[in-house]
Each structure stands twice: as structure tokens, then as C-alpha cells.
Image: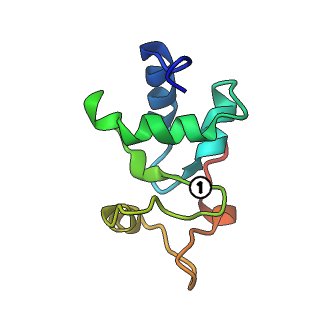
Amino acid sequence: MSKILNENLIYEILSVVSEIPYGKVATYGQIARLIGRDNNSRLVGKVLSMAEFYGDYLCHRVVNHQGRLAPGWAEQKELLSAEGITFKDNGLIDLKLYQWDC
């Protein structure tokens, strides 16, 4: 993965993340498709795990393809709830309601 990870790609991913509107979420795969790397959703996750080193990005708005939150990041649910996003009984986000339509 490090062979394809460079500063330009990192900022390309973070630029897309910065466009996710308030009260909406995007998936890792959705972001990968938007940058023309359809099969690199894990790469997107890797970049987001390092986002704090590149500035202040609203990475809490990115979830997996099922609407599941990032493991080990308790604050993510609080941040999304503060934006009016609600959760199903199973803890997932309803992507039909909250996924960014880009």
C-alpha cells in the first residue's frame, strides 16, 4: 500500500472528505470511487486513520458500506448524533437516509 500512497493521493482523499455535507455520511468505497480508485476502500481507511497529521478533517462522516462506525472511536457516534444522524437498533446508520448523494 505504501507504494501507491503519496501526499497528492492523501490530499485528494481528504479533499473529498471535506466535501461531505453536514448531516450526511459517505462510505470508504464511495470515496475510493470518487477519486477513481474503485478497489481501494482500505486505502481510504488508512489515510483517514492518519488524517490528524494533515489538518482538521471531518472524518467522522465516513462509515463502512453497511453504515458501521469505525471500531475503537467512541466519539464518532457522538459527533454524528450532534449532526442529527440517528442510528438503527443494531447501531448502524441507515445509508438510505443519510448517505451523501454526490
Q: Position of residue 44 (x, y in %)?
A: 53, 36
Quarter of the image for residue 80 reads bottom left
User: Residue type at mark 1?
Assistant: Asn
Relative height, residue 3 to residue 89 (above, below) = above
Element type at mark 1: loop
Q: Position of residue 46 (x, y in %)?
A: 47, 38
Residue in front for this viewpoint, 42 or 83 = 42
Relative height, residue 59 to residue 54 (above, below) = below
Quadrant holding the N terminus: top right
Relative height, residue 52 to residue 71 (above, below) = above
Residue occupying image coordinates x 66% and y 56%: 65
Residue 55 can be seen in this image: no
Residue occupying image coordinates x 58% and y 48%: 26
Q: Position of residue 77 (x, y in %)?
A: 39, 67
Q: How many marks?
A: 1
Q: Position of residue 38 (x, y in %)?
A: 72, 33
Residue of label 1: 64
* Left or right of residue 66, residue 16 in this image: left
Image colouring:
rainbow
Which residue in the rendered view is the most extreme toward the right?
Answer: 38
Label 1 neighbour load within 10 Å: few <14, some 14-19, many 20+: some
Quadrant holding the C terminus: top right
Residue in front for this viewpoint, 26 or 37 = 37
Residue 41 can be seen in this image: yes
